[in-house]
Structure formats: structure tokens, C-alpha cells
Amino acid sequence: MTGGESGGNESQNSGRHHPEKTIVKAFVTIAIIVILGYFLASFAMKLVREGPKEGNVVDYNGFRFEKTGLTWRTQWERDGLLYDLQFRHSPWEVENITVLGKVDERFQMPYLFITHDPPDNVPTRQNSFLFIASADMTSMLVSVFDRHPVEACTVNSTEECSKLPVATCSTNATVIYLKASDNAGILLDGNCATIQGREENLTRAANKAVYQWLGIIR
């Protein structure tokens, strides 16, 4: 066979149509589409079963917390009763609030006061957070712990406080003292729990105290 004849044959072979190759390529393409479809369908079904992952549901120390609006909700059980609780702050957001000291049996005395220093006469952000912390703790103490706190002031120096009893940590009763302070924290001393902070840190400290009472933060 001459060189010219060889070149001509190669040219003819390269131009020929190979149906077997076309069939193989078609099968490979179909297989890839089927496999991708299977994984996409599996992923879609997983999303349907698990719901959207937006960081709104978190497990913490055996409790399931769900973000609803501006609050975190969880369930807490005691003596077969299930309580649906709401918190302004999640437990992991208040873990760094320090707790010092300890209470004794006097903290369980029948009379319970939530006391604070006389607020300013003009509305302030601190006053707003003070009232929020007091309302949150009162609601939790009544609904969960069956305690009925009385609002009080540390001194009778304003018109508002003149209508309330005076209670301090030296009062012979259970006292929760909500205090404005740049040093957020919880100070426990016998019959008294001083919960302090500035603005939002005050509500964080109040939530930390309740989480500890419930055993959610250990």
C-alpha cells in the first residue's frame, strides 16, 4: 500500500460515523442525569423533613430552644406538668454573666420582694429595662415557682416609691434586688439576690438567674 492510498483511507475512516460511540455517550449522559436527579430529590426531601436551617432551633443542655419573633421558647417539666417558657435572651447569650456567692434557706421565705432604687422621674432606657426585667421575673415566679413577689423600692424618696413598701437585702424576707450597674452580674447573699447590669445587660442577668433556678444553666 502506498503512502497516498494510506492517507486516503485514514481520511475516509475519520469521516465515518460510529453509531456505537454515539450510543455509549447517550447512555453516559442519561446515567449522569439520573444520578443528579436522585441526589437533588434526596436533598429536597431532606429539607422538607428537617425544615429550613436558619439557626432558629438550638439544643442546649437537653432543652430545645426555638426563636419565635423576639423571644426564645422552650419547654420545662416538673411533676408531670409541662411549662411553655419564653425568654428574652437564650441561655448561651447569658453564659458569661458572672454569679458570685450563694443563698441559704431564707431565700425560700414566704414573703418575696422585687426591689429597686427609685427610678428617675423622666423616662430613660435604663428605667425601661428595669421594668422589663421586673415584669419578666414576676411572670416567671408566679407561673412556674408559685411565688407572688411584691414590688418595692430600696428607699422612699420619690412619689412613685412612696406608694410601695421599702425592702433591701437586710429585710427579713426573700429579696431580689434589681440594680443599675456597669458591672453585669448576680450577687447571692443569704436571703438576697442582687441582679445588676446596665440596660440590656440587666435583662440578660435576670434571665441568667431564672435559667439557673430552672436548672437549664448548671
Image (cartoon, rainbow, N blue to C red):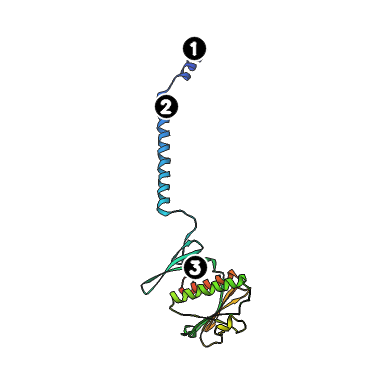
Amino acid at pointer 2: Thr
Q: Which residue is mark 3?
A: 87
> How busy is the neighbourhood of tag 2: few (under 14 within 10 Å), some, or many (20 plus)?
few
The spot of residue 168 in percent (x, y) is 57, 84
Identity of the residue furthest to the left in this view = 80
Q: Nearer the viewer, mark 2 or mark 3?
A: 3
Pinpoint residue 153: horizontal percent, then vertical percent. 57, 82
* Looking at the image, residue 159 lies above or below residue 4: below
Q: Which mark is residue 198?
A: none
Dot 1 amino acid type: Glu
Q: Which mark is residue 22?
A: 2
Q: Are marks 1 and 3 in contact (CB under 8 Å)?
A: no
Report helix, strand or loop for mark 2: helix
What distance separates the C-alpha of mark 1 from that of mark 3?
90 Å
Q: Is residue 125 left or right of residue 29?
A: right
Report the Cα–Cα distance between label 2 and label 1.
Answer: 28 Å
> CB under 8 Å between callouts 2 and 1?
no
Q: Looking at the image, can residue 128 be seen? A: yes
Quick one: 101 or 27, which is closer to the camera?
Answer: 101
Is the residue marked by circle 3 packed among few (<14), some (14-19), or many (20+) residues within 10 Å?
Answer: many
- Does residue 147 appear to the left or right of 200 in the view shown? left
Q: Position of residue 174 (x, y in %)?
A: 50, 83
* Mark toward the viewer: 1 or 3: 3
Identify the residue under disc 1.
5
Q: Amino acid at mark 3?
A: Phe
